[in-house]
Image (cartoon, rainbow, N blue to C red):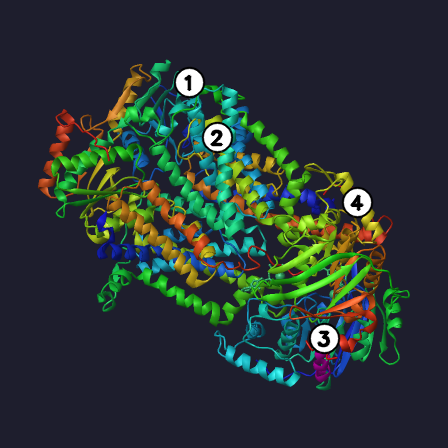
């Protein structure tokens, strides 16, 4: 039993939960200081995230862009680049998707939808490619370029939504709210559980998670990406064009973020407007890392993190605490969860060594059957 | 103690059963920024609080969700409030319109309101949405008149967030007001590109001052930075939306504030009379939705001119024509 | 800062046991060293030599056993403790900060005469003094990354001496040195011994051990086999103690018929990373069934030579031909496909991906060819099959083919690379320092494989700074100096002296 | 538009640039120390906000601005301690723990503002102090010597950090630990202690960056008033190649271009304001891509250190 409690498999699940609880405890003190009942608040949070069909639907809706961004982050990180340009890539993806869908609004819905999502992904990819090429060709650090590109995308959005893409209705009404015209209904993503906002994008995201897994671990492209990420000089030695794969990692990361933007447009907002990126560019990184940078791990991670965000809103609404408190608690959760990982790693290293040693000593079967890596 | 399944009532009105006592009006607010942004969100929250003080805590219950810049989150909250027995759900931002149109039909007993817009959804057969629109151009016009009177250098600096929405309306009105008062006066306009870049707003104010401006104005929450700079340089500031004199009483000459109290009262009254929506309401000088608060330090002649403009806008003798920029 | 050297008359380690999870790295090892003595420590890769020494230096702590200095039991908590007790250590991998200058590396962690402010002038002066006293020539102002390997070694020794070390542990100090550099080091070591220093010397090179040590201890599988005085021991005896069986130290080298030219360099020049000329007009031919050894002092263009052939470094002039085809413009992958294999010098850095499993690393060159992949998709069964096959064919000691390669010993990692490269039956093999840091058992094995490959008709370019290795394996020996081929000597006519002169840049006069 | 090139305008731009660079300098130099020792702290933004609030609130309560600065330094150091525990001791992935710290600081500072102050109210921070004599020098005077005292200190920080980094035993340890922690460890340098020191120092400076806004440039605090400034500061460390002078040049470039675009707008240049706002970001990337010599990052950056026992 004690052995089980120290096993990485158990800790892997138990520790993040313990970390969340610890963060909640500190948050609870803050809640209490603000005159709210922490138990009630967290109960509401939990219920708001997972407690009913509509709660689950809201969580899944939020999970969709998180998962999409996280998939891109998985690829980027595996390729050895730190993509913090998700926000910008979401924005340009959504902008281009919107412009495209409005331009060809008379196409049949399914075709328009498909093309629109593609355009979103391609534009995100192009935005990622700027950072990618700058890094691959001119060795410009991607942290710097993606931070700057986020700001540039934001201003691009301001410019387009205020001028060229401004909703004619807004002009007519003289209100000039910075948002685009609504997309044709024919191309909206299917709503899965009306009246909730849950839409077919979640299915797309889940399918893509599996595809990204296959890409990274079952194809030669993925093998190259991971080799370049782990050891560029070995990759060069193995004949891989390292700069290309560095750029590709950022391009694919951008493609997924851009797709997330397009999916938000086609599934949720049905138009482009400010605030669409919703911080997913950053929370997607968190989700990806929660999921251990594994596309399949990103699924539960995005689900949990999405639930946390949804439940937190519900908590604000019900308990009437300032939104800032919830931001602070989220920050604590993120910090505590990553901090707790060290114990999982240590446990894994310990058992790994034990297993290695045991099998070396027995010497009976120097080679095992297992073949997954 | 174990977590309680059903949140206790008392201080937390939101979770109570839908069937509330008849004479209690329950209002929920959805705000894109915070209740202390000293601009857009604060202005309506303050008005609602004032109304509550007027009507009594037991007659008006308030709940709010702030920082709802993400529309789906706001939509979820709107639905939640409606389902929880709120009589009136106010979505204080134009971006929430589509969500509202979708949600409102599911809750025919509940009134919704949103701004800034003129769309009530009546054309789609929706009857329980009020649309409201503060005439930011009127606020801009009056402050423009005041600023034109105040400036000696004949240069005014305007620090805007982005050139869109309410902020754009304000700028258009401001320019018209200045031009009507003194065509010689030049208005330098700059935008920081966001609502929250306090540091850049401050530097914009500095730049305006360097470029010769001796009166400053601007809108959105970031202007606190600019107000600080105005104060430091002893240059008068003119505020809009909320009462910005709280930030620096000696610097802020006037604030053209949005007073939502009357509008809220109107909506509540209409609702009591059985009209759940379908009307467009405006905040104007005529209906007291916009008021200007003048500082004692403001020169009398300037205040007089501004007040004349107020009156003109109120009685319709002044109409604002926005010029292309 | 105490400049005086402490004195250590004797240091004893008694029944030291150190266990890593699942590994008994040291099992009741008893070992001692005296002032004015050089005590050599021998053993295969993984025998526990470094572990034993790291406990002496406070990097690890013994699970059981005792350390005594001059009869006094001590506990050594940390390197700081060890330094304070007069113990210095030169690690198997250099412990230098490349970006810092020599003086800064030496001053690191030492109190300064000016309190919190560095006093590098003073440090430099003392370095000069130490250099003079022990023949350790190095420029204190030079950044370490500009230094050659031998110089870095000297910096390590200066670092220890500067800290007043009375006992110096040298963990494989010669693994990366040329014979000349090693000889220089031995002069220094002997001088230190005369001065009363206690020295512990770890090496895989039996010749060196026999040449300079007073006593020799051998570890095997974490246990002490024996400690013997240097009188009358032979290399064969030591080898048997280490491995537990007889080891073939000299290999029969049959002359073979050589075939066509498989690899040719014609007038090749290339730049190094700093943009200076590293290869100047190099012309070489390697025939099928031949091993061409490239001898030279480290840093004379060997790395660039290997890299231009592998396609990892652009040519500044000339051409490279594989099997008669000019491949100068080909990327590395294409050359590999054309039958080139390359065992890189920096095996951990270039040769493998440490985080990958053994099986994954075994397909690092073949991953995009059938049967390892079909189209875009990797074939896992084929990868596993290849892994199992090579692990057993090349006797790679690993718990499983799924083990992260990082956790293998250096010798086994080298075997892995060898397995991957040789399994393709290359037409041309470039092997750079293939046995550096590898124990004699594994060295024997690698040599045997290289000769097998030669017998099968491969053209091999063997780049090595170990003259013994070159003399044992090569058919012809090219000597490289400052990027030029000084001469190419048939093995029959090659002597250590003749090669040594060429390596020093002295051209022969007829 | 034609007066964009007259002397007064150019002086104005330079003056604005010098002042705007202040928070970047504090934050980026602090961050540089952390990165030099191997710790990437992406939480600068949150630390700045907490520092800004602490200083603001101190002065709001009637304290001297200097006490406010002290409060900012302390709060910054405390946040740094938190970051160090998580990323050095617990070896958490540094990028993500930094994002967590950012969120935490953003939330907590806004919460404190709301609970303790309500709506923002301006305070009397540091006044502009024209340095007697120096500010009289033509051109140079109005550009460099017409600021509040926190601006001057920010620039003093550049030579000070040069000295600390290259001329002290502490700086030597920092450089060694960031490049080769194993080597430093083998010489008895306490790697994690050095990292704690730099992260705490760096965060204290980030706190001061916040103070330079709230009690220096702006005299007020507002929710999320840094608005991404902290992330720019991190980017500037990369731009500056982990060197004080490089960071200084990066901060000046970025802020001067910001100032330039503000002037363009004010003077009515026919460019959409949104596009003008992009300028500094674009130019920073371009400058790094074409002009600035690339320097390798500290080899151990983002890699936690643990002895191999
Ligand atoms: N930090 C560690 N954790 C776990 N196992 C270790 C560690 N260090 C060494 N070992 C194991 O202890 C054993 C002895 O290793 P050590 O490094 O002492 O060998 P060595 O004799 O120095 O070998 P080489 O000649 O290759 O340097 C090996 O099995 C090794 O894998
Ligand atoms: N610490 C340093 N400071 C400044 N420049 C350096 C430093 N280290 C290396 N360089 C520069 O970078 C060049 C490349 O160094 P190095 O050989 O370590 O590269 P590398 O990428 O590791 O290549 P390889 O894979 O061949 O080892 C050096 O020759 C030098 O010009
Ligand atoms: Mg060893
Ligand atoms: Mg190298």
- Same subunit, tags 1 and 2: no
- Same subunit, tags 2 and 4: no
Image-based side of D52 in relation to B215, left or right? right
Q: Position of residue A104 (x, y in %)?
A: 44, 23
Parent chain of label 2: A
Image-based side of C389 in relation to B64, left or right? right
Parent chain of label 4: C
Q: Position of residue C416 (x, y in %)?
A: 77, 54
Q: Give the residue at mark 1.
A: B107
Classify the position of the C terminus of chain C by image quarter: bottom right
Q: Give the residue at mark 4.
A: C386
Nearest the eye: C347 or A63: C347
Classify the position of the N terminus of chain C by image quarter: bottom right
Question: Distance between the Cα atoms at labels 1 and 4?
Answer: 66 Å
- Name the quarter showing ligand 1: bottom right
Q: Give the residue at mark 3.
A: C502
Question: Distance between the Cα atoms at labels 2 and 4?
Answer: 46 Å
Parent chain of label 1: B
Question: Distance between the Cα atoms at labels 1 and 3?
Answer: 95 Å
Q: Which residues are magenta?
A: C182-192
């Amino acid at each position: 039993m004690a052995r089980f409690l120290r096993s990485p498999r158990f800790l892997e699940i138990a520790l993040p939960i313990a970390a969340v609880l610890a963060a909640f405890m500190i948050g609870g003190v803050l809640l209490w200081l603000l005159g709210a009942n922490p138990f009630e608040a967290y109960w509401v949070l939990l219920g708001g995230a997972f407690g009913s069909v509509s709660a689950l639907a809201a969580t899944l809706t939020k999970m969709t862009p998180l998962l999409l961004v996280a998939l891109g982050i998985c690829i980027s990180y595996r390729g050895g680049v730190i993509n913090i340009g998700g926000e910008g890539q979401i924005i340009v993806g959504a902008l281009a998707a919107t412009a495209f869908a409005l331009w060809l609004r008379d196409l049949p819905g399914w075709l328009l939808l498909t093309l629109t999502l593609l355009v979103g992904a391609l534009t995100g990819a192009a935005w990622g490619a700027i950072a990618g090429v700058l890094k691959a060709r001119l060795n410009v650090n991607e942290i710097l370029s993606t931070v700057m590109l986020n700001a540039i995308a934001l201003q691009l959005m301001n410019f387009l939504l205020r001028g060229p893409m401004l909703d004619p209705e807004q002009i007519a009404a003289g209100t000039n709210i910075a948002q685009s015209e609504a997309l044709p209904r024919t191309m909206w993503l299917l709503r899965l559980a009306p009246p909730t906002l849950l839409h077919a994008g979640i299915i797309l995201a889940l399918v893509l998670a599996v595809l990204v897994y296959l890409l990274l671990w079952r194809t030669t492209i993925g093998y190259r990406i991971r080799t370049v990420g782990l050891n560029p000089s070995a990759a060069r030695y193995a004949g891989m064009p390292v700069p290309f794969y560095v750029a590709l990692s950022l391009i694919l990361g951008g493609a997924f973020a851009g797709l997330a933007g397009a999916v938000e447009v086609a599934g949720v907002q049905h138009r482009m407007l400010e605030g669409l990126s919703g911080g997913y560019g950053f929370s997607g990184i968190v989700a990806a890392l929660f999921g251990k940078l594994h596309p399949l791990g990103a699924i539960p991670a995005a689900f949990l993190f999405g639930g946390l965000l949804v439940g937190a809103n519900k908590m604000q609404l019900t308990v009437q605490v300032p939104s800032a408190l919830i931001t602070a608690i989220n920050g604590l959760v993120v910090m505590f969860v990553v901090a707790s990982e060290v114990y999982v790693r240590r446990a894994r290293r310990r058992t790994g060594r034990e297993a290695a040693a045991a099998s070396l000593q027995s010497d009976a079967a120097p080679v095992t059957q297992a073949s997954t890596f | 103690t174990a977590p309680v399944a059903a949140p206790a009532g008392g201080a937390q009105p939101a979770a109570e059963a839908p069937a509330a006592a008849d004479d209690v009006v329950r209002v929920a607010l959805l705000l894109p920024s915070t209740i202390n942004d000293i601009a857009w969100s604060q202005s309506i929250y303050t008005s609602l609080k004032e109304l509550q003080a007027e009507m009594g805590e037991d007659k008006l219950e308030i709940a709010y969700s702030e920082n709802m810049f993400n529309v789906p989150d706001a939509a979820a909250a709107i639905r939640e409030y409606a389902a929880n027995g709120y009589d009136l759900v106010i979505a204080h931002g134009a971006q929430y319109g589509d969500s509202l149109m979708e949600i409102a039909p599911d809750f025919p007993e509940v009134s919704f309101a949103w701004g800034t817009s003129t769309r009530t959804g009546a054309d789609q057969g929706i009857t329980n949405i009020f649309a409201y629109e503060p005439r930011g151009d009127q606020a801009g016009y009056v402050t423009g008149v005041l600023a034109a009177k105040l400036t000696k250098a004949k240069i005014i600096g305007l620090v805007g967030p982005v050139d869109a929405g309410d902020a754009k309306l304000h700028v258009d009105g401001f320019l018209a007001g200045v031009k009507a008062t003194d065509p010689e006066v030049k208005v330098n306009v700059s935008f920081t590109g966001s609502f929250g870049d306090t540091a850049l707003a401050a530097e914009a104010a500095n730049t305006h001052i360097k470029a010769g401006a001796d009166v400053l104005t601007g809108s959105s929450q970031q202007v606190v930075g600019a107000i600080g700079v105005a104060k430091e340089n002893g240059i008068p500031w003119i505020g809009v939306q909320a009462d910005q004199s709280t930030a620096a009483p000696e610097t802020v000459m006037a604030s053209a504030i949005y007073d939502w109290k009357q509008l809220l009262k109107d909506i509540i009254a209409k609702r009591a009379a059985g009209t759940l929506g379908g009307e467009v309401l405006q905040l104007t000088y005529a209906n007291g939705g916009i008021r200007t608060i003048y500082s004692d330090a403001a020169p009398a002649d300037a205040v007089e001119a501004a007040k004349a403009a107020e009156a003109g806008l109120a009685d319709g003798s002044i109409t604002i024509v926005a010029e292309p920029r | 800062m105490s400049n005086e050297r402490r004195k250590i008359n004797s240091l004893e380690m008694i029944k030291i046991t150190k266990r890593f999870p699942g590994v008994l790295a040291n099992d009741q090892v008893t070992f001692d060293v005296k002032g004015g003595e050089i005590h050599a420590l021998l053993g295969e890769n993984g025998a526990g030599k470094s572990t034993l020494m790291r406990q002496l230096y406070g990097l690890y702590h013994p699970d059981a056993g005792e350390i005594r200095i001059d009869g006094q039991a001590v506990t050594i908590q940390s390197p700081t403790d060890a330094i304070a007790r007069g113990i210095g250590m030169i690690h198997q991998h250099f412990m230098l900060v490349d970006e810092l200058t020599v003086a800064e590396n030496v001053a690191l962690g030492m109190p300064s005469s000016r309190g919190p402010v560095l006093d590098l002038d003073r440090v430099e002066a003392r370095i000069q003094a130490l250099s003079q006293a022990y023949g350790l020539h190095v420029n204190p102002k030079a950044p370490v990354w500009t230094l050659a390997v031998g110089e870095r070694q000297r910096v390590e020794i200066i670092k220890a001496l500067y800290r007043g070390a009375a006992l110096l542990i040298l963990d494989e100090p010669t693994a990366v040195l040329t014979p000349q550099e090693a000889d220089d080091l031995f002069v220094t070591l002997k001088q230190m011994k005369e001065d009363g220093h206690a020295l512990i010397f770890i090496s895989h090179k039996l010749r060196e051990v026999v040449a300079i040590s007073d006593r020799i201890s051998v570890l095997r599988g974490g246990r002490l086999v024996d400690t013997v005085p240097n009188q009358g021991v032979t290399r064969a005896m030591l080898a048997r103690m280490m491995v537990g069986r007889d080891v073939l130290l000299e290999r029969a080298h049959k002359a073979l018929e050589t075939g066509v030219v498989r690899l040719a360099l014609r007038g090749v020049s290339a730049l190094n990373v700093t943009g200076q000329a590293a290869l100047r007009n190099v012309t070489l031919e390697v025939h099928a069934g031949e091993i061409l050894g490239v001898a030279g002092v480290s840093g004379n263009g060997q790395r660039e030579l290997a890299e231009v052939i592998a396609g990892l470094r652009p040519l500044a002039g000339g051409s490279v031909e594989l099997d008669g085809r000019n491949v100068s413009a080909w990327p590395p992958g294409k050359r590999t496909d054309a039958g080139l294999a390359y065992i890189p010098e920096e095996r951990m850095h270039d040769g493998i991906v440490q985080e990958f499993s053994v099986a994954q690393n075994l397909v690092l060159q073949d991953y995009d060819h059938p049967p390892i992949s079909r189209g875009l998709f990797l074939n896992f069964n084929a990868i596993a099959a290849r892994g199992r096959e090579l692990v057993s064919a090349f006797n790679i000691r690993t718990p499983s083919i799924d083990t992260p390669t990082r956790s293998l010993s250096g010798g086994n990692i080298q075997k892995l690379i060898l397995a991957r490269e040789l399994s393709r039956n290359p037409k041309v093999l470039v092997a750079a320092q293939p046995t550096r840091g590898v124990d004699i058992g594994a060295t024997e094995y690698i040599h045997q494989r290289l000769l097998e490959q030669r017998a099968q008709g491969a053209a091999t370019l063997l780049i090595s700074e170990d003259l013994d290795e070159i003399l044992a394996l090569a058919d012809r020996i090219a000597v490289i100096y400052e990027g030029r081929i000084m001469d190419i000597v048939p093995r029959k006519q090659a002597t250590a002296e003749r090669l040594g002169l060429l390596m020093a840049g002295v051209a022969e006069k007829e | 538009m034609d007066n964009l090139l007259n002397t007064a305008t150019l002086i104005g731009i330079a003056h604005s640039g010098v002042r705007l660079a202040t928070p970047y300098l504090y934050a980026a130099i602090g961050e540089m120390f952390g990165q030099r020792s191997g710790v990437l702290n992406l939480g600068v933004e949150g630390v700045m906000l907490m520092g800004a609030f602490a200083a603001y609130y101190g002065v709001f309560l009637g304290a001297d601005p200097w006490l406010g600065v002290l409060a900012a330094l302390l709060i910054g150091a405390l946040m740094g301690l938190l970051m160090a525990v998580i990323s050095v001791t617990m070896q958490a992935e540094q990028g993500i723990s930094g994002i967590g710290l950012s969120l935490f600081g953003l939330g907590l500072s806004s919460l404190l503002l709301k609970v303790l102050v309500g709506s923002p109210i301006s305070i009397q921070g540091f006044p502009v102090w024209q340095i007697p004599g120096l500010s009289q020098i033509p051109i140079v005077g109005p550009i460099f010597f017409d600021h509040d005292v926190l601006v001057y200190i920010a620039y003093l920080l550049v030579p000070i950090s040069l000295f600390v980094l290259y001329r002290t035993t502490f700086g030597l340890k920092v450089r060694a630990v960031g490049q080769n922690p194993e080597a430093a460890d083998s010489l008895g340098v306490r790697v994690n202690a050095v990292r704690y020191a730099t992260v705490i120092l760096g965060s204290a400076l980030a706190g001061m960056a916040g103070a330079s806004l709230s009690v220096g440039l702006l005299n007020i605090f507002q929710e999320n008033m840094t608005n991404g400034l902290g992330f720019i500061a991190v980017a500037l460390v990369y731009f500056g190649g982990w060197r004080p002078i490089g960071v200084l040049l990066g901060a000046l470039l970025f802020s001067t271009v910001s100032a330039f675009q503000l002037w363009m707008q004010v003077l009515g240049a026919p460019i959409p304001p949104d596009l003008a706002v992009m300028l500094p970001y674009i130019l920073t990337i371009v400058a790094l891509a074409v002009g600035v010599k690339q320097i390798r990052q500290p080899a151990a950056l983002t890699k936690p250190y643990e002895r191999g026992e």
